[in-house]
Image: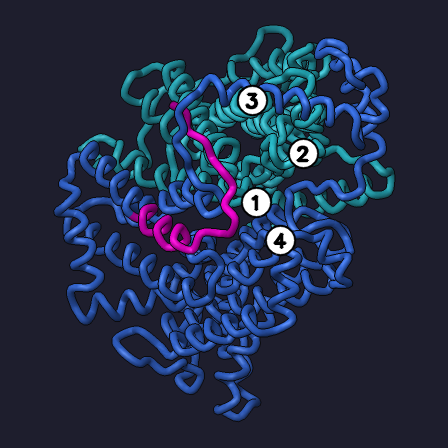
Chain colours: A cyan, B blue
Amino acid sequence: MIDTLALLTSILTITLRAGASLIYGAIGETYTERSGILNLGVEGMMLMGAVTAFATAYYSGSVWLGLLVAMGVGATLAALHAFLTVTMRANQVVSGLSITLFGTGLASFLGERLGPASNNFNLVGMVGPRFSPIEIPGLSEIPVLGAFFKQDLLTYALFLLVPLAWAYLYKTRNGLNLRAVGESPQTADAMGIDVIRTRYRYTIVGGMLVGLGGAHLSLAYAPGWSENITGGRGWIVIALVIFAMWNPARAVLGAVLFGGINAVQFRLQAGGATTIPSAYLNMLPYLVTIAVLIAMTWWEALSHRIGAPAALGTPYTREDK
Amino acid sequence: MKLELRKRESISRRAAIVVPLASFGVSLLFGAILLIVSGANPLQTYAAMAGGAFGSVNGLTEVLVKSIPLILTGLGVALAFRMRFWNIGAEGQLTMGAVAAAGVALFWSQGMPAWTILPLSLLAGCIAGAVWAGVPAILKAFLNVDETLTTLMLNYVAVLYSEHLYYVAWRAPNYNSGTERIPEFAWLPRIAGRAHAGIFIGLAIAVLLWAVFRYTRWGFELKIIGANPTAARYLGISIARNIVVTLLVSGAISGLAGAGEVLGLTRRLQQGISVGYGYTAIIIAWMAQLNPLGVVLVAFLMAALAVGGDQIQMRMRLPASVGVVLQGMLLIPMLAGSIFREYSLHVSRARNQESRIENREDTDRQEDDAVDGEAAETGGANGSSRSRGTGGAAGTLRSGGTEGSAGSLRSGGTGGSA
């Protein structure tokens, strides 16, 4: 009995730790998509956030500086996406893909170039400062729920960020304007909202959060840099936004689901008590993503609900009415 | 002075050639900055890359080796992109093609006549690739499930599966990451160095697709669906059927790329089958503006960048990923420039007068907005001031959520269900 509780606590602890980067990313992408911009560059932005955060922290010794740089890098790439899609009216899908391809390539180049000379300029295998889990005395000893109080600072910050992100979107004038731009830019424009500026702003804010998600990977969840540290998390983030029906609070549920899969996978593999080949276990997150997408699409069709902002993916110009 | 974009009467052909070339220049320029920052001489590096790719027979044949899978996956992706179906799963389709071809070549050679194994293996590669693309196609066609995510997720599944095969299930006893060698009668013949006959298959498919796009009804239907799904539906074109058929073909071509790698190059299923060709294919297809003959050209160039990258790693101890960065950078100026195909840039003076006219037009338009279509239900917004408009528009927002305008797309992709 006590063993079961301990097991559950440990699974939940890992779940939250694994889910944190997903939540950062999903909130960021939700904001971006709410403005009508689909950003498929999340994977590349996360990788860039992860590599620059780790490199900065490694040389400066400050994880905080690492976070700042990761946010800046995420914002820069997002601004590029906004420039291409909003100003230059490029196809949003292709622009996002190109950000991912570029970010992936550049991150792997930087990982092979930013390291110390003693390691042949390679960052892989270096140990740097990190966000370690902080146990809150008393609270962390509660069975199962104690898992919420054995986290790193970035995960704790989410306890604040998630409700704030939800309230901003649904309870403030700015949030209303943002949703209006994503639903009907024409109407929003007529209301006097600057559609172009709104789209730029929230694409960039989204990029910052995605960068933070990447930084959580290389500074807290799996401290250090390894090529492809994200393992497709950027894409899972995009699926999570759909799963959460563009609601930042609901994204937590999705992130916990995916974090949970990671945790169970980890447990099974660490325990060695399974005959399932590890490759099949490793496929789980990707297969579950597909299953979740099918279920969500089906459910939306049955219940006649559409969660996606109506103008998602379409450029806005005043001529094209 | 004021810069202004005006819509062109027709799509500019000159821009279609100038923009990709300029993108290549910008990409090299960005790469040069990156190289200078990391302490290397860009001119030397580029010279070494070009020398490595084109300076020797060996280099040239290696470029050919890499261009085979790039041509094939590039064609597969371009075919799907024609109808704006975002198949980004070429990597997985290639991997499954390699798996199936290796499986047939390794395990069917007992009971079958030897000469049948090569064609059967190629066919198996096609089928596996087609299945891998067919699943997302069916999900999109009948349930409207977002295809970017499903095709991409299947890449990870395919790569993990192939790893399981060559590390565990099919691993040769004295090898740690590869199967037994496939029997010689199943090899795809080599034509020069390591370059194999797959290049002819690639070129043939390119010409075939070019003819399909130009002369057939199918090619026409793909174009219409890509440009305007609603119009396609009015014309009686079945979008669902087109999605499934096109994607089966698209996947089969990418599967063939994988089969070619196994039967012509590595001659066993081993580590290094999946090295990102399927992602580079996206860059290739878009740079070539979805033109099959353009795909061949761009694929060759990309192969040269990759071979050049390998060379500078060996010679100058720079990361081979320089080539990948240059490839990744290509699309960004390309996308920024593509606006000039449809718009031309005008510089005009007399700012005051013009902006006043524009302002008046804006007000007219706002009134139009308020009167027509969706704004009808907002009631209060009609002809009202901006602040009152807010409340009205919020009403639209909510009703838009529950009714859900029928045609609204999630990814702006191929259009809804049939």
Q: Nearer the viewer, mark 2 or mark 4?
A: 4
User: SS of the residue at dot 2?
Assistant: loop
Q: Residues within 10 Å of mark 3 (few under 14, many from 20)?
A: few
Mark number displayed over residue A272: 1
Q: Is residue B143 left or right of residue B169?
A: right
Q: Which residue is mark 2?
A: A311
Identify the residue at horizontal 29%, vertical 17% (top origin).
A60
Q: Which residues are magenta?
A: B1-24
Q: Is residue B387 magenta?
A: no
Q: Which residue is mark 3?
A: B357
Q: Is residue B17 magenta?
A: yes
Q: Are marks 1 and 3 on the same chain?
A: no
Q: From the image, which quarter does the C terminus of chain B lie in?
A: bottom right
Q: Are marks 2 and 4 on the same chain?
A: no
Q: Are marks 3 and 4 in contact (CB under 8 Å)?
A: no
Q: CA distance from mark 2 to mark 4?
A: 17 Å
The answer to whether residue A176 is above or below residue B302 is above
Q: Which residue is mark 4?
A: B227
Inspect the image, locate mark 4, and give the three-letter code of the amino acid beneath it: Ala
B247 or B270: nearer the viewer: B247
Identify the residue at horizontal 50%, vertical 70% (top origin).
B210
Inspect the image, locate mark 2, and give the three-letter code of the amino acid beneath it: Ala
Q: Give the chain of mark 3.
A: B
The answer to whether residue A244 is above or below residue A167 is below
The location of residue B33, given as percent across then percent down, is 23, 35
